[in-house]
Amino acid sequence: MQDAPASRQQQLEQAERVGPAFSVDGMLAARNGTRRAIAEIAARVRPGMVEEDAVEMAKGVLRDAGLALSWHPTRVRFGRNTVKPMRLASEPGIVLGENDIFFIDIAPRMDAFEGDGGASFVVGKHHEYERCAADAEALFHELRGIWTRDGLTGRQLYEHGKQWALARGWVLNFDLPGHRVSDFPHAAIHTGSLAEFDGAPLPVRWILEIHLRHPSEAFGAFFEDMLLGDSFFG
């Protein structure tokens, strides 16, 4: 006799399971180490750098911080590479201009715990790049705030995000639709996206990803962080 199909509630609970080493304190420590490393990497990026050299620099920063293990590739993307989905390789040899945009995407492991974070930065002056970078972070907090107040599902959050982005002249990239984090490896527990999750997400379980692109020009901006309440953000 076949087992009965899992109920919707059982499916949601299974998607938010954790491994045997999971702890909230461990996950938050990995998150905090990730944010510190992003700031350190960004401070070392300069116009004239080649993207591949920036990636190697970022790996060095992570090693020096005791975060040599990563569960996905370390990425620093410059200029027109900022529109590419993460699953696609960067165009090689891109040099950061004097007035340019770049983003960082890192996923260090701290002991058993997965960190994951990203942010965008502008060098020099460029109004549209600055607006795009600011809007990527603003949309992250817009969706996080709605989740905190209204308990929307992951799917509803990303649908709201799509309309928010369009109203400001951007395209929200659904190739980066948010995902689980846990004690490593979360992929052994759940590989589905936040944008397809039909429950109200639990805190310290999900990464909310925002990737905005200009609808016709070759630049975009990225921001991601753990889905957490207001007290974790200054």
Image (spheres, rainbow, N blue to C red):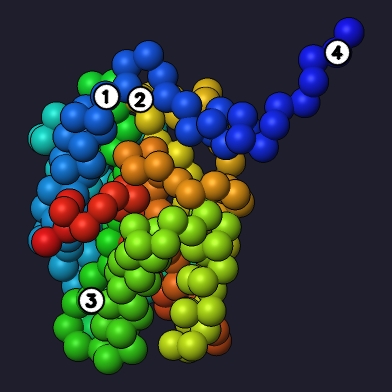
Residue 122 numbered mark, or none: 3
Give the labeled residue for mark 2: 183
Give the Cα separation between the discs numbered 3 and 1.
35 Å
Give the Cα separation between the discs numbered 4 and 1.
35 Å
Q: Nearer the viewer, mark 4 or mark 1?
A: 4
Q: Is residue 86 above or below residue 130?
A: above
**Mark 4 burial class by Cα count in 10 Å: few <14, some 14-19, many 20+:** few
Q: Secondary structure at mark 2?
A: loop
Image point 56% across, 68% down: which residue? 159
Give the Cα separation between the discs numbered 3 and 4.
57 Å
Image spot of residue 29 (x, y percent): 17, 34
Quadrant showing the C terminus: bottom left
The one of 114 and 26 positioned closer to us in this rendering: 26
Query: Which numbered disc flags the more N-terminal residue, 3 or 2?
Result: 3
- The kind of residue on which mark 3 rests is Val
- The kind of residue on which mark 1 rests is Ser
Q: Nearer the viewer, mark 3 or mark 1?
A: 1
Give the labeled residue for mark 1: 23
Query: Which numbered disc flags the more N-terminal residue, 3 or 4?
Result: 4
Image spot of residue 141 (x, y percent): 31, 66
Give the Cα separation between the discs numbered 1 and 2.
8 Å
